[in-house]
Image (cartoon, rainbow, N blue to C red):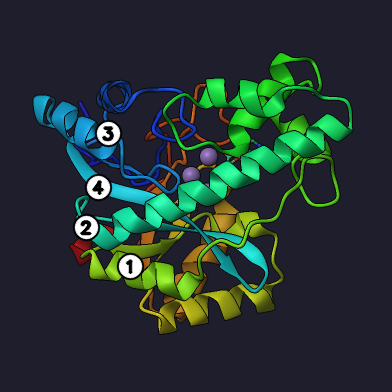
């Protein structure tokens, strides 16, 4: 038996675009020997109460989290809020607004797909999303299920992204406002998967620097799809900007293109672990 603590601070449930219910996710975390798990659904806290109940039945610590969609410099940037008060009113109001934006975007995506001959995408995608926050991931499932693409990776090359059918840009709340909301709810703001935005090094430095100025505290140094080189790059950024480091798989489902739940490298030495901030 290993006594190493396994930590995974980024995962999704059916409250957004994950495959497992909050309870099933906690059970999977236990199966994968995770000791500390954060549930971080897109723009919602609706899965947290169920996840906490499940976590208290198993020997596992559940951190209340959320993954906020934000707009910065004309790009969508994901900010994970960790250890938030799940009952905070400002966070709740923000999630209502965000889900309204998501609903409006989903309708527009449906209209755009209709123009290229793909019918009823909105209605069918809403069925897939169920009670969860509607995301492009649900549209990608619809497109794959209906033979319009061979895989989700294929969808995100041919549909739903800039200059492709079904792309709709969203005016997400600002980075600054989002960090403030997380901080005021007692949480720690973390830049999610920093290398997935495909920014130049100069842009990424600007993001980290402005994030820090607004009260952001940590960077996801180890994320699901990182290799060792990328982990080293992010470790150096975290050190340079005196940011804490976080570790998260971004687990969605068994076919996730990135890591499985808890199957991650540890946080490199010499960084402040984000979980020491709470
Ligand atoms: P949204 O927040 O609605 O724009 O949807 C973003 C979600 O789509 C991400 O959280 C992933 O779940 C999924 N996604 C984005 N890009 C990819 C990709 N290249 N492959 C698979 N899933 C992706
Ligand atoms: Mn997702
Ligand atoms: Mn994300
Ligand atoms: Mn995520």
Q: Are marks 4 and 3 in contact (CB under 8 Å)?
A: no
Question: What residue would you read off at disc 1?
Answer: 181
Of helix, strand and loop, which one carries label 1?
A: helix
Q: From this viewpoint, is residue 223 visible?
A: no
Disc on the earlier residue, 4 or 1: 4
Query: Quick one: which residue is furthest to the bottom in this view?
Result: 213
Q: Nearer the viewer, residue 86 or 104?
A: 104
Q: Is residue 228 above or below residue 125?
A: below
Question: What residue would you read off at disc 3?
Answer: 34
Which residue lies at the image location 70% right of the left edge and 55% below the top edge? 169
Of helix, strand and loop, which one carries label 4?
A: strand
Disc on the earlier residue, 4 or 3: 3
Q: Are marks 3 and 1 in contact (CB under 8 Å)?
A: no
Q: How far across and how far down the image is residue 195, in percent?
A: 61, 58
Which quadrant holds residue 246?
A: bottom left
> How far apart are the two marked residues, 2 and 3, measured between alpha carbons?
27 Å
Nearest to viewer (mark 2 / mark 3)? 2
Q: Report the side of 49 relative to 214 (left or right).
A: left
> How far apart are the two marked residues, 4 and 3, measured between alpha carbons?
15 Å
Which residue lies at the image location 63% right of the left edge and 20% below the top edge? 124
Question: What residue would you read off at disc 2?
Answer: 88
Q: How far across and how far down the image is residue 275, in percent?
A: 24, 58
Which residue lies at the image location 20% right of the left edge and 36% below the top edge? 49
Question: What residue would you read off at disc 4?
Answer: 64
Which residue lies at the image location 25% right of the left edge and 47% below the top edge? 64
Of helix, strand and loop, which one carries label 3?
A: loop
Q: Report the side of 244 relative to 125 (left or right).
A: left
Q: Are marks 2 and 4 in contact (CB under 8 Å)?
A: no
Nearest to viewer (mark 2 / mark 4)? 2
Q: Are marks 1 and 2 in contact (CB under 8 Å)?
A: yes
């Amino acid at each position: 038996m290993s006594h190493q603590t396994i930590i995974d601070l980024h995962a999704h449930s059916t409250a957004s675009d994950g495959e497992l219910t909050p309870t099933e996710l906690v059970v999977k975390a236990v199966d994968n020997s995770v000791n500390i798990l954060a549930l971080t659904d897109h723009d919602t806290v609706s899965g947290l109460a169920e996840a906490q109940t499940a976590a208290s039945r198993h020997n596992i610590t559940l951190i209340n989290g959320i993954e906020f969609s934000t707009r910065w410099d004309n790009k969508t940037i994901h900010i994970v809020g960790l250890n938030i008060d799940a009952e905070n009113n400002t966070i709740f109001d923000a999630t209502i607004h965000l889900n309204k934006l998501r609903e409006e975007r989903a309708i527009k995506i449906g209209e755009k797909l209709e123009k290229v001959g793909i019918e009823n995408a909105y209605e069918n995608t809403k069925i897939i999303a169920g009670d969860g926050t509607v995301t492009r991931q649900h549209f990608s499932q619809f497109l794959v299920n209906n033979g319009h693409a061979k895989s989700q990776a294929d969808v995100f090359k041919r549909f739903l992204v800039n200059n492709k059918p079904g792309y709709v840009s969203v005016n997400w709340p600002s980075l600054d406002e989002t960090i403030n909301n997380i901080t005021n709810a007692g949480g720690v703001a973390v830049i999610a998967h920093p290398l997935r935005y495909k920014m130049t090094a100069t842009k990424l430095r600007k993001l980290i620097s402005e994030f820090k100025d607004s009260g952001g505290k940590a960077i996801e140094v180890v994320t699901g799809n990182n290799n060792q080189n990328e982990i080293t790059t992010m470790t150096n950024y975290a050190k340079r900007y005196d940011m804490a480091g976080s570790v998260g798989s971004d687990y969605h489902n068994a076919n996730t293109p990135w890591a499985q739940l808890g199957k991650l490298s540890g946080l490199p030495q010499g960084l402040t672990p984000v979980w020491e901030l709470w």
